[in-house]
Amino acid sequence: MTEPATSTVAPFVEFRSVQKSYDGEILVVKDLNLAMPKGEFLTMLGPSGSGKTTCLMMLAGFETATHGEILLDQHPINNIPPHKRGIGMVFQNYALFPHMTVAENLAFPLEVRGLGKADREAKVMRALEMVQMGGFAARRPAQLSGGQKQRIALARALVFEPELVLMDEPLGALDKQLREHMQFEIKHLHETLGITVVYVTHDQSEALTMSDRVAVFDDGRIQQLAPPDELYERPDNSFVAGFIGENNKLEGTIEAFDADKALVRLRTGELIDATPVNITSVGQETLVSIRPERVEFKPENFDEGAHTIEAEVLEFIYMGDTYRTRMRVAGHDDFVMKSRNTMGQERLQPGQKLNISWHPEDARALDP
Amino acid sequence: MSDAQADPALTGPLTTADGRPLKAALARAEARSKRRAFFLVLPLLLFVVVTFLMPIGQMLAKSVNNSGFYSWKDRDAHVNVPLMVDLRGWFDDNPVGTVPDEAAYAALVAGLSHAREVKAIGQIGTRINYEVSGSRSMFTKSARRAAKLEPPFKEALLDLDDDWDDPKLWGSMRNASKAFTIDFYLSAIDRTRDADGNIVKVDEDRAVYVLLFKRTLILSAVITFLTFLLGFPIAHLLATLPLRHSNLLMIFVLLPFWTSLLVRTTSWIVLLQSQGVVNDVWVSAGLIADESRVQMIYNQTGTIIAMTHILLPFMVLPLYSVMRPIDPSYVRAARSLGATSWTAFRRIYMPQTVPGIGAGGLLVFILAVGYYITPALVGGSSGQLISNLIAFHMQKSLNWSLAAALASLLLFGVLLLYWLYDRLIGIDNLKLG
């Protein structure tokens, strides 16, 4: 996994305080700073309208930054037209040229680069083999299924051997099973070819499974840029905590805190332990975020000295590999606890009252 | 599900609940709904047959069949009276090129006096007049006296008019003696028959139709090309603008449709005539001298300008309907793959608009080929098209058979074009809207 800021190599792709506004009033992208080393798989994740696709389009050259600089291999590319940037791109709807066969589609980028016929054919075949579509050269895009189109679009973006490939929600139109399969294949191609990939998606599981690092976008800003595990386990703010994975939220105020522990008084009066993340002062409002699978209800698993809190079971849902228990905690009816379906795992009954707890590291006191 | 598999109904032939074979029952139900659907389109079908297919059929029939010399429809008695029976018999007995003998003249005189009796002489004269001009008066004049003529008839007739032994006249009477003839098609391509029945070109100074066909095709091609040149950018703009703006622009494109054709055409006259707005502006701007005003109307230029304007929407609309759904990401994809914007346009965008170009081109060309009112008003003599001549033969010369032959040639030409388009581009690639 590539380490971000500590990396000593010069960044391959860099955004320097980039801003973008379409109408001159509202900033769609606000002060974007991002540095990517060569060979990284970076995902831009965020809800629609968060500015992630705009960033991708600025990198591809289809939108111009209204402020700031974009550098590719340390050269500013703000004023370079898209066809001279040499960036491969996979579009959401594949954008395969409908009037050309698969082979002609793949040969197009080679043709405009002035490659000879023999060279073109060899490269096209190699690219098709790479995505296991060798037998489809003579087909038209309309004769392909969604997954096959996806592979061809991928092959076309790679056939001219770009060092940077952009992907704009490429798997959005596929069904779940195919999507998971293609995620694996894209990841595999990235590793074998050593290309740098910027991937845009709004699907968090896709972002987590594929990326070296994920940039979570909201409101035109990167909310957190981190490897997937860090993003999931140690979200920087309540947006990231809420956007990635399931998450229980408890509101309260800070009673006391030091570098690695905070005592939070909930609205309903209970005291709980948490890890301070963006806490600045005692008495500050906070939102404590706890992942459902980190909630414990068996006293023998409780962390020593941790505070416990009362809970009442409202609903028990059997989900196959896990149990999902919805309970009332500190006045919230939607507190969820997830437990693995292991041998002898206890099934809680609705109406049951018990104490629950968690490791203070797993509860993160964030901005409200 | 396992119950259903055990059901004997599923193992034997399928039946309905009351035991009839399912296949027949389904077929009957389908036939009923098909009948109902047919009754719904029946009024339109009848309308099309009566107002479209029958006139075309009549026109085609008229172009090869003219009974002017053959039979006379008595409108009071509602019977067809055969004409020139004896003469037709003589033509049948004697081969082409036989010099008419006394028997032939006797038959002609008998036919003339009979025709005068049944008041059909005008029709006969008109029919022969199509081919031998000036012969109509000869027929009526001679027919008036035919009953009183004494043998030998040849001399008697030649006394009345010495053109009666003209071999060309006899040739055309022989042609006309059969109701079925392709002579009108021959005339339509500037051919005629000489006295011996051979097909020859007509005199240079009387050959007009081929020239007009050529001019019609060339002008239509020019107009089609101009509408394409002007319409393509507009359609592209319409297709790429946000819907709110493009709807407003679309109104401007459609505006000419809502204005009378006559008004639009006459407004071009106002603009383009030599004392018109455009010339006045040029003169006052000092671009041209007052005495050398440009003649832009009552000639081919006028026809081209006015028709291009009138037919422009027929090019813009099919183009627009093809361009609108073309995803902008195709061009973006081409650009990201290394194509310049011109290459992306030429290789990726243009080919996808071909169905619209084809449809618009075909539509404009076919409309232009048959256009009548605009060339009639602004074409002068050099801007007349074949349709103006067809109208002339329909309304002035009353040679309907020739008009029908000209119109049929036009129809076949358009069908040929359609067939060519199908072979080259494929008719399923046509997108009209």
Image (cartoon, coloured by chain):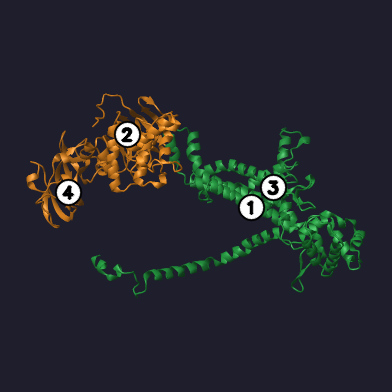
Is the same chain shared between marks 3 and 2?
no
Label 4, residues with CA under 10 Å away: few <14, some 14-19, many ≥20: some
Coordinates of residue A58 in the picture (x, y in percent): 39, 34
The residue where tag 2 is placed is: A197
Helix, strand or loop for disc 1: helix
Question: Residues at badges 3 and 2 in contact (C-beta under 8 Å)?
Answer: no
The amino acid on which the numbered mark 3 sits, given as a three-letter code, is Phe
Helix, strand or loop for disc 3: helix
Position above or below: A204 against B337: below
Considering every residue shown, the one lying at the far bottom of the view is B18
Q: Residue at x 12, y 56 (%)?
A: A352
Indicate the chain coloured green by its letter: B
Quarter residue B205 falls in: top right
The amino acid on which the numbered mark 2 sits, given as a three-letter code, is Val
Indicate the chain coloured orange by its letter: A
Which quadrant does the C terminus of chain A fall into? top left
Marks 3 and 2, how far apart at CA? 63 Å
Q: Is residue B320 left or right of residue B58?
A: left
Q: Nearer the viewer, residue A317 or A26?
A: A317
Q: Nearer the viewer, mark 3 or mark 4?
A: 3
Residue A338 circle label? 4
The amino acid on which the numbered mark 1 sits, given as a three-letter code, is Phe
The residue where tag 1 is placed is: B412
Residue B213 circle label? 3
The amino acid on which the numbered mark 4 sits, given as a three-letter code, is Lys
